[in-house]
Amino acid sequence: MFLFCCIKNYSSMEIEKKLQYLLDRFEIQDVITKYSFGQDLHQGEDRNVQEVWKDVFTDDAVLDFQAAGNPPTNYQNMIKIMRGDGVHNGNMSSFSNWQHLMGNPVVEIIGNEASARTDLWATHKGRIDVGIPNQSLYVAGAFSDELVKTDHGWRICYRKLEIHFMDNIHTVQ
């Protein structure tokens, strides 16, 4: 009943436009969250992050993680930077486990383009076998994304990492 009361003053075209906005926004939020799943579901030696990230980024997407000391690059190279290339360790190789939580997205959609800013909270547990047991790294920040609607759905074409603070904290095993 409430929904009917709210929409009865809109034309069918207005309702269709609002519904499309909601569907697009949900899909954008899912794409933003899939980034975290790509990171977190493929921990340790499993480097198959690309399996998930191909549904997150456009082929030519730029990831600007200069805040973490990495030059802007594509997502395929960022996977190598983070996980290693099979010969060299990546910058996440000193962690045994991690979790990336995304929240509070602000999304603006204009046609087939969108921008979003999403808070990030990431935790990383130090690996015992590389000499940093009892250490955890916590990162608070945000991602600023530019997205485009493709034939395969919404994809991030530009992502910039912003770090508010990082803490390396002694923990108990």
Image (cartoon, grey):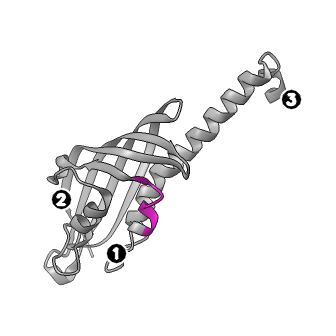
**Height in image: 107 above or below 132?**
above
The residue that label 1 is drawn on is 47
**Height in image: 3 above or below 155?**
above
- Write down the region rendered in magenta: 51-58
What separation in Å lies between label 2 and label 1 (alpha carbons)? 25 Å
The residue that label 2 is drawn on is 168
Q: Which kind of residue does numbered mark 2 sit on?
A: Asn
**Along the viewing direction, whichever of 98 and 78 lies nearer the viewer:** 78
For discs 2 and 1, the disc positioned in front in the rendered view: 1
Work out whether mark 3 precedes mark 2 in sequence or the reverse, and give the earlier one. 3
**Height in image: 126 above or below 116?**
below
The residue that label 3 is drawn on is 1
Label 2 crowding class (10 Å Cα cut-off): few <14, some 14-19, many 20+? some
Q: Residue furthest top?
A: 9
Label 3 crowding class (10 Å Cα cut-off): few <14, some 14-19, many 20+? few
Work out whether mark 3 precedes mark 1 in sequence or the reverse, and give the earlier one. 3
Looking at the rendered structure, the secondary structure element under dot 3 is loop
- The image quadrant where one finds the N terminus is top right
Label 1 crowding class (10 Å Cα cut-off): few <14, some 14-19, many 20+? some
Q: Residue furthest bottom?
A: 129
Residue drawn at point x = 45 percent, y = 54 percent:
56
**Along the viewing direction, whichever of 43 and 78 lies nearer the viewer:** 78
For discs 3 and 1, the disc positioned in front in the rendered view: 1
